[in-house]
Amino acid sequence: MKRILWLFLFGAALLLTAAEAGKPQAKLQAAKWYFRSSVPAGPLECTVLFDLAGANTQELLRMLESVQDEFQIPVQAMAVNAVQQTDAFAAATGPYVIGLAADDHLKTRNTLAENESLFPYAVLSENGIVVWSGEPTELESVIGQVKAKKFSLSRQKKIESLRKELQMAIQSGLPHVVASTAEKILKESPSDRIAIQARVMALSSSGRMAEIQPFLERVCRENPRDLPLRVMQLELLLRTGNNVEFVRAVERFGRDFAKPEAALVRPVAYIVENAPYGILPPELTAALAQRAYDGVKDNPRSLNYAIACETLARVRAEHGRFEEAVKLQESALPLRLKTPQEAAAKARLRYFQLLRQNSAR
């Protein structure tokens, strides 16, 4: 589960909206389908255009599988690449439970995202009408709002108007205008990923790297329950090699999310799997992994339960508690059978068993 979920956040290209909210979504036109969504069609549907050359593409698709599983809405991923390239990718990384297709002649790209050159790019529609478009890591939040009837279409249209200004500023190479326009978007939508990435890009291109971390800290304070944003912050710290601030950010994370809850499973898995070896206090990783596990232990048939077991098993093994690690990994294994993660789950179980065996000698 290396670099799970949101790892592509800052490696992803900056996205600017093309599908227009309030208008019908264009029909998908695939050159070839490799897998079909396991969820039947319903009122909500999500389409994601992506480039196989993008950073951490496989992790993106696995994240989309999680979104589909959580919300039970069909997700279609369209690769804007030649069929031959997508053939090789699908054979090497599949199967997927989301839809996966090749948009070889860019027919879908040209109808959904004609002005886009960089991806991934997500479009969410309800009853065939586009309600939102943007960076895929926002999908969980947006879908939750749409399902709860709390999503504002009028605000989305205003944001899209500002994004057009943002696009012109980027094309003109005006970082100060990019930054100010991004702030306008953030006033409308404090967690807008496109605006956040635009602001980071503007600071970087202006040589103001020291301001990026305080900016992200501010965004996280303004969105205290937005877990993907917290992981975005952690990812940037890892990418820039700022281990001291990474540890501090994880400690703040632990204080801010002090009680067990299911939503912690994937962020904690990300932290445990990606933290450089030896920099986090053992008691901190143990507490976080246990907290995430406690949030789902009463739902032992869920995918989150498997992830929580595997995360806690890894921590237990790192702390020399090999018997517990084996039992936890054994609990996760049945949920990994007949999935793309089966081989990795079995390999990890064998590793923990060997650790237990060697410790007994």
Image (cartoon, helix red, strand yellow):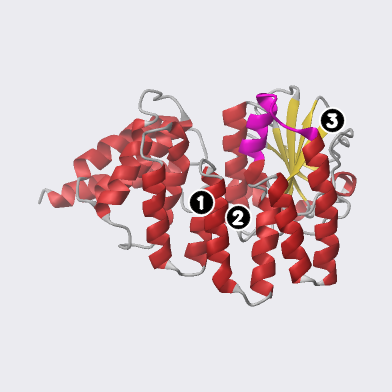
* Looking at the image, residue 151 lies above or below residue 109: above
Which callout, 2 or 3, points at the residue further toward the start of the chain?
2
Real-space Cα distance between discs 1 and 2? 9 Å
Which residue position is annotated with label 3? 129
* Looking at the image, residue 41 lies above or below residue 236: above
Label 3 element class: strand
Which residue position is annotated with label 2? 9
Question: What residue is rendered at 66% in x and 51% in y?
Answer: 193
Q: Amino acid at mark 3?
A: Ile
Q: Amino acid at mark 2?
A: Leu
* Residue 229 in view, yes or no: no
* Residue 210 in view, yes or no: yes
Q: Residues within 10 Å of mark 2 (few under 14, many from 20)?
A: many
- With 324 as the anchor, is 244 left or right in this view? right
Which residue position is annotated with label 1? 231
Residue 345 found in image quarter: top left
Real-space Cα distance between discs 1 and 3? 31 Å
